[in-house]
Structures are given as structure tokens and as C-alpha cells.
Amino acid sequence: MDFFDLLTMLGGLALFLYGMSMLGDGLAKISGGKLEQILGKLTAHPLKAVAVGAGVTAVIQSSSATTVMVVGFVNSGIMKLQQAAGIIIGANIGTTITSWILGAAGIDSSSFLVRLCKPTSFSPVLALVGVGILLFSHRDRRKNVAYILLGFAILMMGMDTMSSAVKPLADVPEFTGILTRFSHPVPGMLAGLVLTALLQSSSASVGILQALCVTGAIGYDAAVPIIMGQNIGTCITAVLSGMGGSRNARRASLIHLYFNVIGTALFMILFYGINGIAPFGFMEQKATAFGIAAIHSVFNVTAALCLLPFRGGLVKLACLTIRERGGNVSAGKGDANGGQNVTGQDGAASREMALQRLDPRFLEIPAYAVEVSREVAVTMAGLARQAMTDALGLVGQYTPETGRQVKDLECAVDHFEDGLGDYLVKLGSKDLAESDSYTLSVLLHCIGDFERISDHASNIAEAAREMAEKEMSFSPKAWEELQIYSRAVRDILEITMDSFQREDLELAREVEPLEEVIDSLNREIRKRHVKRLRKGKCTIDLGFVLSDLITNYERVADHCSNIAVSLLQAGQDAYDPHAYLDRVRQADDLGFQGRVMVYGERYRLP
């Protein structure tokens, strides 16, 4: 093997790793975060958890990615440790599918149909189709399909290039001498562990081992311990991911480590114990790509079957390793909120739990991170809605307890804006699908409006407190007008928040006509207030309070309009709310003018 063969081998390795990454990214994008949602929800039954973990890992082609997601779920309180254990066990089974696909590349037959079924034979066709889609299609989903096809083709091209480049090594005594040392269980296991830890992918390291099989220098006596070490080495990604997380997040990463360490130890003891008594004949044979895939699968399936009934023991062991403060052991059963949205009435702890869902680990799965961000934004919208609803109820019926609740909600919304805003900015630097990019844009525009709505709620509560402390009250006429105005504001708030939560564009189109009516109400109430002030029917102090209230009402309606426009312009390249509002307010827009008239009748002042 000369210098240029070495370059070819390194180039093949680079293509192989890039293709694997490209394939995984394409699969993750086309799933749109749905696979991750399945992971977070369909894990109540242990066998179902194992099946989901295996299925998702088989699709995204990475047990490390699945385990990192699980660590993130546990850290953010979405998942319990018992559920995590089942998924992690399943992930180790799912990752073996890659070795079978790569093993198919080693099929050797003179039959045309058999050769056609080889991945290396049809992957050039997939590459041509993928390139064609990228050149001539502008649809985001089709491009993701193209990335999957190209990723697979590049993966197989890299595998074939590596295999071709290492063939001359079969005649190099030094190379075969190194591999002979790996036939001893401990050095072989350590070699597989280190290689996988460096690559942070057992699928990649198994693929490299399969590529080396073409040299004929690797026997099963060397392949078996290397494969065992690869299963332990893949845990490094999850362990690193767990660092800096919650106790249960670190425990989840340890469950992955303990499963593979215990499974490997048991397998090695039993396998080499039996081999010492009744030697396996295949151990002296040269390893094949399919043989390596079979060993990889048999080990992981056997380990899963043996350790699944003892998953509670794995959880207990992880909890013994990382104890609660004070030395107590907890299985973390109460660490999850079931993935449900948290409203402002559930307390500060529950709101903090909702923010914990913005786990930095999810940034590596942008589609899912966008979905989580949207769910947290919906929670934030609910807090702002609750604050405003409570504040409107305080006008004329002030209670200190509700006043404090409005203030607490306003502080919570501020906290959400800081946490969610920072997370969205980081997410914006990731490679997002077009639809996810639109969603991100909407969220960035809307969270500021949610925060301002809660600020106005606090202002209204403060005005209500001032009225109560000074024992001020409006005249019956002014009070009747204010009640109609409050009802309009409450309705536009409900329509806006519902349209945001459901992503209902038809409902969002109802906001602007109502906002027009609220502007008219604001002007008319001010005129009537000035008349009462001139006739001495209203005091200066009450006039200031009324002005404060209706100003905040009108501002809330403005922010509702901003949110609705953000939703309606989500699919447009240029965000221009002023141009949109000018367009819908045109006199010849009969639909818009008709809705204004309907709302005008509904909130007509007496």
C-alpha cells in the first residue's frame, strides 16, 4: 500500500462519514420532528418503548442521536427514567440496521439480479435522481428526499472506495500482525472502544470494520472483541451530552453506559467461556461484512432480551451512582410533566418546568427544537392571556390577591421572553427546513407582543388598584361604555391566542377587522369623556385613570394585530405588516369591510 492508496482510503473514509451524516440529517429533516415527538409520547409500555427506540434509531441511523434526544427529554422533564431505559435499550437494536445495509455491499455473485440488488450498484442511480431533484425542484420536502438519496449514495461510494484502497493491505505483514493482536479479547475490545469514541458513532466504526474485511486479514477472533468495544465506545456521546444537565439527565446517559458495559461483560464471559470449553469453528474463519452485521445484531438483541426485565435495576444503579442531595436515592419518577402545556395557574415550578423543555441538546435536531419552541411559546401566550383576563376582571372589582397574580404572571412572561428569545436566536443559526424557518420567524415576532400584552395587563391592574385605594368609581354611563370596550378587548385577545395556538389562519383574519372597531371605540370613548369632563360629570383623577385604561386596551389590540399579521405572513419572503394592513383596509375589500360592520354592530356604544 503506497502513499496514494492511503490518500484514497482517507478520502473514502471522509466520504463514508459525510454520507452517513448527510443521510441522517435528511431523514431527520423529512420527519419534521415527528419521530422525536413519538419518542417523547409513545413510551409508556416497556416493549413499546424498546420498539419505538429501535424504530426511530433505524430511521435516523444513529443510536447516539437517539440517546442524546432521550437525555434531553429526561433533562427537560418530558420523560421519566423508566421510559428512557426502554428507549435506550431499543436504540442499541435499531443501530444494527446500518451494518446490514453496508453488509449488502459485499454481495458477490455473477447473477445480474443479485448484483443489481447491491447498494453499490443502484446507489449511482439514487445519486443521479438526488442531483436532479436538487437542480430542478424548489420544494423543501423534495430537497430533503434528495439529501437522503445523495447521502446514501455518498455513504456507499465511500464504503466502496475504502474497501478498494485497503485491499493491498492483505499483503502487508505489519498490518496483519497488528490485527492479530486484536484477537485477544481485551486489546480488541479497547481498540473498538477507542475507535468508536473518536468517531462518536458505532455505525461508522462497524462500517470501517466491514470495509477492512475485504483484506481477508480480519478473522472472527479479532472482529468479535472489536464489536464488543464498539458498543461501549458509542456511549461517549450520551455521557458528554449528560454533563451539565439535571441529575436525571446524567442518570439517563449512565443507563446507556451501564447497559452496554454489563451486556458486553456478560456476553464476553459467556462467549469466551463456552469457546474455551467447546471452541466455535467460525472463530478461525475470515470475517465477512454480513458476518459482522450478524454478530452486531445478535449481541444487541440478546443483551436487550436479557436486560429489559432488569431495566429497573439499571435505573436504580444510575440513581445509586448519582444520588440526590443528602444521599437519598430517587428513581426520578416524578420528574416529568407528561409533556403537557403549563398554564399560569400551575405555579412558578410548573412554568420553570415548561422552560426546561428548551434543552440545548434539541438544537442538534432543529425540526424538533422548532416544535418544542412553538409549544413553549403557546405556554407563554397562555400566561399573557391569563394575565390580561385577570387584569380586565380587576377593573371595578379589585382584589390584592388577583393583583399580585397579574404581577407574577407578567414576571413569568418576561422570563419566558428571555429564555425563549435566546433559544430561538441559537436555533436560527441552524440549518432549518423552509417551513421551520417560517415558524421560527413567527415565534420571534410574536414573543415580544406576548410580553407587551402582559406589561399592559400589569398597567391595567395598577390602574384598578389606584381606583380601589382612592375609592373612585365611574359614572354609570362611563362604566357601561368601558364594559363594552373591555368585552371587545377580551374577545380580540381570545381570537388571537386561539389562532396562534391552533395555527388557524382563518381565525387570524378575524383580528384586524375587530382591531379597527376597537380603534373606533377608543376614539369615541375619548370624545365622550371630554364632553363629560366639560359638563363636570367626571373628575380629573378619574379622567387620568380612564385614559390610562383605554390606552392600554388599545395597545393590547395593536399587539393582537401584530400577532395575527405574523401568522398570516408566515409563508411570505418579505415581512411587511404595514403593506399587508394597507392592502386589507382598502375600501374595495368587501370581505374586510363587511367584518368591520359586523363587529361594529356587536360592540356599538349606547
Image: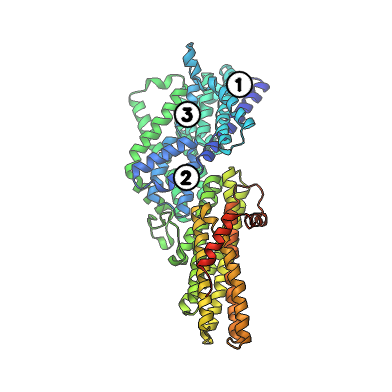
* Residue type beneath disc 2: Glu
Residue 312 drawn at (x, y percent): 34, 48
| Residue 201 visible from this viewpoint | yes
Real-space Cα separation, disc 3 to disc 1, in angstroms: 20 Å
User: Could you say whether the residue bearing mark 3 is in a helix, strand or loop?
Assistant: helix
Q: Is residue 353 above or below residue 209?
A: below
Residue 91 drawn at (x, y percent): 43, 39
Residue 222 drawn at (x, y percent): 47, 26
The label on residue 165 is 1
Mark 2 Cα within 10 Å, few/some/many (few <14, many 20+)?
A: many
Mark 1 Cα within 10 Å, few/some/many (few <14, many 20+)?
A: many
Q: Is residue 493 above or below residue 200?
A: below
User: Could you say whether the residue bearing mark 2 is in a helix, strand or loop?
Assistant: helix
Q: Is residue 392 above or below residue 376?
A: below
Mark 3 Cα within 10 Å, few/some/many (few <14, many 20+)?
A: many
Quarter of the image containing the N terminus? top right
Q: Residue furthest bottom?
A: 536
* Residue type beneath disc 1: Ala
Q: Nearer the viewer, mark 3 or mark 1?
A: 3
Residue 537 drawn at (x, y percent): 58, 87
Who comes first in sequence, dot 3 or dot 1?
3
Who comes first in sequence, dot 2 or dot 1?
2
Q: Nearer the viewer, mark 3 or mark 2?
A: 2
The reply to whether callout 3 and callout 1 are in contact (CB within 8 Å) is no
User: Could you say whether the residue bearing mark 1 is in a helix, strand or loop?
Assistant: helix
Q: Residue at x 55, y 68 (%)?
A: 454
The label on residue 99 is 3
* Residue type beneath disc 3: Ser
Residue with the mark numbered 2: 36
- 507 and 202: which is toward the camera: 507
Q: How many marks?
A: 3
